[in-house]
Image: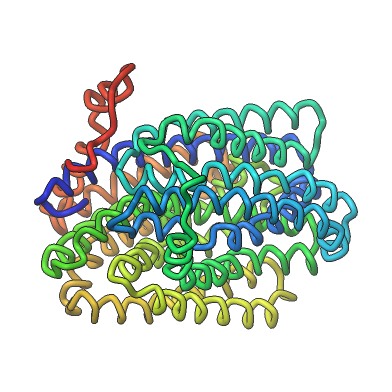
Amino acid sequence: MGDPGDGIESQVVSGARWVVLLRVGTMATLWITSIALARLLVPSQYGLAGMAMIVVSVLTVFQESGLHAALIQRRDRIQEAVDAATAYAPFAGVLFMAMTFAAAPLAGLFFRHHEVTQLVRALSIVFLLRSISQVPIAVLQKEFRFRSFALVMLTGSLFQMSVAIGLAAEGAGAWSAIGGLIALEAWCALLMWRVCPMRAHPRRASLTELRGLLRYGRNMVGANINIMLFSYVDLAVVGRFLGAPALGAYTIGYQSGKQAVANVTYASNQLIFPAYSKLQDDLERFRRAYLRSIRFITTLSVPVSFGLVVVSNEFIRVVYGERWTPAVPVVAIMSLMGLVLSVTATMGEVLKATNRPGLFFRISLLETVLAVASILVFYRFGIAAVAACVASAVTITGGVVTWQISRILRLRPADWIGVLRSPILAGLALVGGIVLTKAGVGALTKTATAPILLLLVVEGAVIYLGSLRVIEADRLREFLREIEKLTSLRRLLRGLRFGAGDASPTG
């Protein structure tokens, strides 16, 4: 989804193919694991694991210190920067591991569950493991070595799934999810340096180089803290005030409603930041590349978001079971939020690539303040109200960041209309078709069987593609060409052969 010239498009397309494979694979393993654990664990056990992971995720933001973004943005003295970051990262990892282990009882007190203390202490080793893999991951992404990165992460996800489900089947309860995460991080720590194209020399580390990296990353740290607070305030409030069963249902609904679109935008962002960093001095190419990427993302995400809204009830009952029906409204709300995210989630990469991390920080702060304030007021109305607060904060902030991106890239209202009109109209046709089908066979859809769900999904896909062909055939052809590039089986198999290399950094 880049723009031709200087080898950037070939790098992006090659990298995108592996990132798509990675996201599809990890999404599949995540869903399989989530479904298996939902059926093997009771909601309270699922919620306990979520409570422990919230604590570790909060502290992980501080550990990263903006090094990832700083290394990708760096244009010269790359080896010196890698040496400095490699010397710093393990020190920070050990420090945060010790702090987390010592402070774990506070998490138990906050969530009113003693078992959370032990779960957090077990997860503290994640900080050490991530400190080992942090630098090579940034180098792999900077150099467009997405084949190596994807293969390590895919095999790690399979390992995580096997460990988590195996422990759950043995009756490990909440410890099954914890064990799976530790297994994944250990796998990455073991293999990421082995596939990294650079070798670090920590003994040559320069304090001056480290200060430069941390200086660039300080705004990113602030933004990451805001994003972290935004991402976990809802989970923390639900777990603290509504209890573990409510947190389990909210987590299922949140992940199911947001995950599909989040995977698309996450995959895009891994490619967009290094690619846009190379285009920041060419506004016209930058604008074309940005609009092209947004066209692709929205064409793919709109039917997912709209479709999940209208089949949320059938989806939860078929996939997770009747006991998880409280998650249905959360799925619907998060699906609508996913539509907003499909447009706005990549905008942070534009701000970083154009050297505006301070603006990125301020916008993320606005989103966090809106979410925290509204959740603390409305959480008493249940998990659906919490989900609505999160979606409202995303929507309001989305309007602000869209205005800023329009100024930076000189985008006109007509540009946005051209990007959004066709997929939204086709998405509305999808919704109308499924609603009519459900009304016509209401007695059947009440049973929420897998064949009925499959019928609705297939119908929605056919209506969406058919409507898009009628509304804007060129848009559909462009989308199918992009899909063909990303999913070329012949090229993928060639890359999987022993000895095949990554895309060259020079294209």
Is 419 on the left-hand or right-hand side of 54?
Answer: left
Residue 244: x and y in percent read: 79, 56
Q: Is residue 35 above or below residue 121?
A: above
Image quarter hosting the C terminus: top left
Residue 117: x and y in percent read: 84, 53
Residue 326 visible in the displayed image: no
Residue 121 visible in the displayed image: yes
Task: Name the residue at the top extreme.
Answer: 498
Is 427 on the left-hand or right-hand side of 32?
Answer: left
Residue 213: x and y in percent read: 44, 63
Tally the marks: 0
Rendered residue at 28%/70% (across/down):
354
Residue 195: x and y in percent read: 41, 31
Rendered residue at 74%/46% (across/down):
46
Rendered residue at 56%/42% (across/down):
132
| Camera-side residue of 258 and 145 | 145
Colouring style? rainbow
| Camera-side residue of 433 and 94 | 94
